[in-house]
Amino acid sequence: MVDPLEQALQRHFGWAGFRPGQRPVVEALLAGRDCLAVLPTGGGKSLCFQLPALVREGLVLVVSPLVALMQDQVRQLQQRGIAAACLHRGLGGPAWQELRSRLADNRLRLLYLAPERLRHEATRQLLDDVLERGQLVALAVDEAHCISAWGHDFRPDYRRLGQLRSLCPGVPLVALSATAAPQVRADIIRLLQLRRPLIQVRSARRANLHYAMERRPADPLPRVLEVVRAARGAALIYARTRRSVEQWADRLSAAGMPAIAYHAGMDPECRQLALEHFLQQPRPVLVATVAFGMGVDRPDVGLVLHLDLPASPEGYLQESGRAGRDGLPGRCLVLFDPADRRRLARAIRAAGQPHGLQPADPEMPRLELAQRQLRRMEAVAEGETCREQALLLAVGELAPACGRCDNCQAERSAPRDWSARALRVLELLEERRGRDLNSLAVELADGAAESEEERWAWLARRLVEEDLIRESDDGVQRLYVRPAGQRYLRQPWPLHWAA
């Protein structure tokens, strides 16, 4: 017998079969059931809501966080002959009327819009008209982790998406993300008011990716050129600020490695040209802020290089997951420095200051959570255990060591006992009733070389990981002795680490 879903899959997308996790979601939506789909980058999340629209010959409304992301997906669908459109604030009068006409004649299968559009009366009227005509097959919320304060990319406008249930009470809703820790999944289900949803969670493990994290040299350019030249296909380089994006694109180009910049501060035409260059050139090198890449379908990215410490393990899993979507080997390298953590912590703290946030404010827990996530990312970067295992643990997935990352393949020197130094750190903190990390390291180094200060700071961070020390969540990096640290002061035990 001919399978109608596989037949539609072949006709519209040219695929011989479903990828793991896709078919149950498609079937649930067609049966009118809500879904939560957490499928890894490259796992084909978009097809889960695109195929039902084609099978039912109706409309699926897709909420997505970035205009560039929506436009890229619409372009890809149109190239396949699938009727899709994007509703955004730049849509002029004639284009708006054309969109309304296509909807009225049922000539549109997928309509993408940002969450902010739902605030507008014209959008709500459009939605009412589609519902009245019985055209709406499903609602889809892409990058659904953005709705949760526990997620790595929280967007306040996503909080309002719970209204979709009251606006479209009988329409099935699917929430999709590449990574979502258990707390994030619980938030998505609660805030989007999903009703008895099918929950489809696939492993975020990507067996073709090689993770490595290295201390950033004083001048990273030679190392960056080395890894970019060795990469296959496209190279995607992430820098933290718009200014550093432009500086690195210029430095690479001046060194004989043509590179282009992409960030939100560029005018739309330049951004579009940069995106087209990245998608169409055989071996492009693109330097961007981390927002670039969500939903951008370039399968042969051979290198994802971060020039700074990522802000969280969950965010890094998504960003690094843009490598190797074709199943071939992909390299994921982070060049970091301990100072990155301090800069990011200050930026998170500053995010609350313009609003005068105090500890009792609802937004404060989110900012404190961001500090904790940053601390966990630093622990992954400085740790000696399997990189992939540590990253997956951050999203609630237990996995064995990968055997591929730099730590798994490293030949390490014999560990040394740090217990005597640990006692000095704990004694000083107990004596001073807390101390910020920098001044602690300076005092312990007692005028020695800067490398000795870094070693004491490293040890203090390790003691935080061991739960012997508590670090404040305000970004100041103030340290206090935990109860376990007080027990250690009374009765020390060996602490062995390679360093």
Image (cartoon, grey):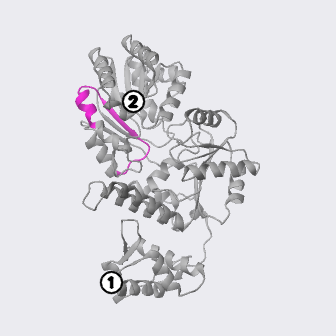
Q: Secondary structure at mark 2?
A: strand
Is residue 328 at all visible to an observer of this figure? no
Q: Pinpoint residue 131: horizontal percent, then vertical percent.
A: 28, 19
On screen, residue 360 versus residue 305, left or right, reads left
Question: Quadrant of the image for the C terminus?
Answer: bottom right
- In-front residue for pair 106/392: 106
On screen, residue 104 versus residue 254, left or right, reads left
What is the residue that sits farthest to the top in this orientation? 105
Question: Quadrant of the image for the N terminus?
Answer: top left
Tell me which corner region of the image, top left, top right, bottom left or bottom right, holds residue 3: top left
Circle 2 packing at 10 Å, graded few (<14), some (14-19), many (20+), is many
- Is 339 included in the stretch rendered in magenta? no
What stretch of residues is rendered in magenta?
A: 162-181
Q: Is residue 31 above or below residue 343?
A: above
Q: Which residue is mark 2?
A: 62
Q: What amino acid is found at the position of numbered circle 1 in the picture? A: Gln
Q: Which residue is mark 1?
A: 486
Q: Mark 2 or mark 1, which has the lower sequence index? A: 2
Q: Residue at x 49, y 85 (%)?
A: 444
On screen, residue 335 versus residue 70, left or right, reads right
Label tally:
2
What is the residue that sits farthest to the right in this orientation? 256
Q: Is residue 477 above or below residue 166?
A: below
Q: Pinpoint residue 343: horizontal percent, then vertical percent.
A: 49, 63
- Is 164 included in the stretch rendered in magenta? yes
On screen, residue 396 versus residue 128, left or right, reads right
Q: Pinpoint residue 260: horizontal percent, then vertical percent.
A: 65, 42
Q: Is residue 25 above or below residue 91?
A: below
Tell me which corner region of the image, top left, top right, bottom left or bottom right, holds residue 164: top left
Q: What amino acid is found at the position of numbered circle 2 in the picture? A: Val
